[in-house]
Amino acid sequence: MASKLSPHALQDQRSQFHPFTSINDLRNEGPTVMASGSGVRVRDVNGKEYLDGMAGLWCVNLGYGRREIVDAITRQSERLSFFHTFNGMSTDVVAECAEALLARAPVPMSRVFFGASGSDANETQLKLIWVYNNLRGRPEKKKVIARWNAYHGSGVATASLTGLPMMHNLFDLPKGPILHVSAPYYYRQAPAGMSERDFSKQLARELEDVIEREGGDTIAAFFAEAVMGAGGLIPPPEGYFDEIMPILKKHDILLVADEVVSGFGRLGTYWGSQTYGYEPDLITSAKGVTSGYFPMSAVFISPKVWDVIEGGADQVGVFGHGYTYSAHPVGAAAALAALKLIDDLNVVQNVADVGPYLMQGLQDRLGQHPHVGDIRGKGLMLGIELVKDRETKETLPMANRTGRQVLKAAAERGLITRALGDTLVFAPPLVITRNEADEIADKFALAVKDVLG
Ligand SMILES: Cc1ncc(COP(=O)(O)O)c(C=O)c1O
């Protein structure tokens, strides 16, 4: 097998320890090595072209090779390649970027705190939440609730927050004050015959039970993605946020909206919270902020939280948190260019159009397939769950790794998808056209048939 690999694949295979990769698979099959990209397409070192149905890792929202972002990065690198924001320092471009972000927030926000990844941004959130309650004289109010199947990052604290056992097992994470409640996974976890509304009510009751069991005065925050991404592409059932928001408010629990994937248009509104009509106290964003052209994250802090932190300035002294690459000027330049393109290209409207079109295309081609159990999602965040039996929803044997087989069949046909177990996911660049969406649906339907008949 290894002899067929390209020189770069061999080099990579013997030298790189890959994130979220099976060591056995990599040893047996080698890596796929990409070399270039343009628009919605990437090309590997052997010259094979793929339509990137995942926008990298749900981040290259504006597609590859965007001249405006490349030029902004080049200009900023030449002018001032780095300066920091510790000790009251800043850069012109960072100041502009922070203000541009605040202007786009879904609800009035007071400040933006920059980092380099979604994980570090959620670590920042945890610290902000704890500082907030210390300054309010509530040192017991520190527990955080997240959901099973959530993905909030892979740092020590954020992997604990993440609700995926494969990220907990073997790593000896200090669990800390983190609790998990059920995922809003209607297809798999709602009792047979229950409506989405009633399932939302059931989940809200469970949340309230946990809060009451633990004591509301011990719970600081609830973390939620709008649509769960890496945990299985799980959109909330109807009425979910309407049910849980009043409970959070009643118990004075902050809502941290993890918009790392859903922010900047992916669901067909600028923010995921706008799709589902809830108001976050804190927002985590990353990925789409620079369209993946530069590692950058931005935490948005509402007046409610900021006023407490600013009001405690004497007690806080020097705020003891930050990263060398917080507010990197090249990232800020990339973000400013990306934000402008999102506006100029009407990206959000494109998602509102092409998202449902792609969903329909998948439904048309696969809606009746005996092994397609569920096609779900919102905007350009779609998942297709494969099953052994549509009627009973019985899962396929795990050992078959059917999701992975379909992923490979799609790759053969020049389409990149992602397999989350047996749920295949699409989150293409947000600038995708209807024709390109047809290409995804056509190639994917053929890949499913290649594997499952
Ligand atoms: C919702 C969500 N939050 C946080 C993260 C972590 O971001 P990063 O991988 O940049 O640390 C991700 C990554 O996919 C994510 O999907």
Image: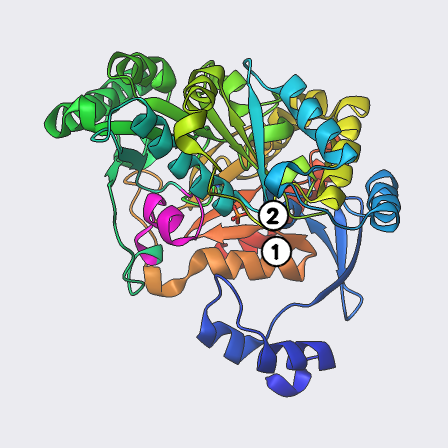
Residue 387 visible from this viewpoint: no
* Residue 347: quadrant of the picture: top right
Q: Which residues are magenta?
A: 151-166
Q: Dot 2, how many residues are within 10 Å of its Cα: few (below 14), some (14-19), or many (20+)?
A: many
Q: Earlier in the sequence, mark 2 or mark 1?
A: 1
* Residue 67: quadrant of the picture: top right
Residue matched to label 2: 444
Ligand 1 is within 8 Å of the C-beta of the residue at disc 2: no
434 above or below 106? below
266 or 137, which lies in front?
137
Residue matched to label 1: 410
User: Of helix, strand and loop, which one carries label 2?
Assistant: helix
**Residue sitting at x 53%, y 17%:** 274
Q: Dot 1, how many residues are within 10 Å of its Cα: few (below 14), some (14-19), or many (20+)?
A: many
**Residue sitting at x 60%, y 25%:** 356
The amino acid pointed to by label 1 is Ala
95 or 144, which lies in front?
95
Q: In the current view of this chain or complex, which residue is farthest to the bottom?
A: 3
What is the distance, in whole Å, between disc 2 and disc 1 at their CAs? 6 Å
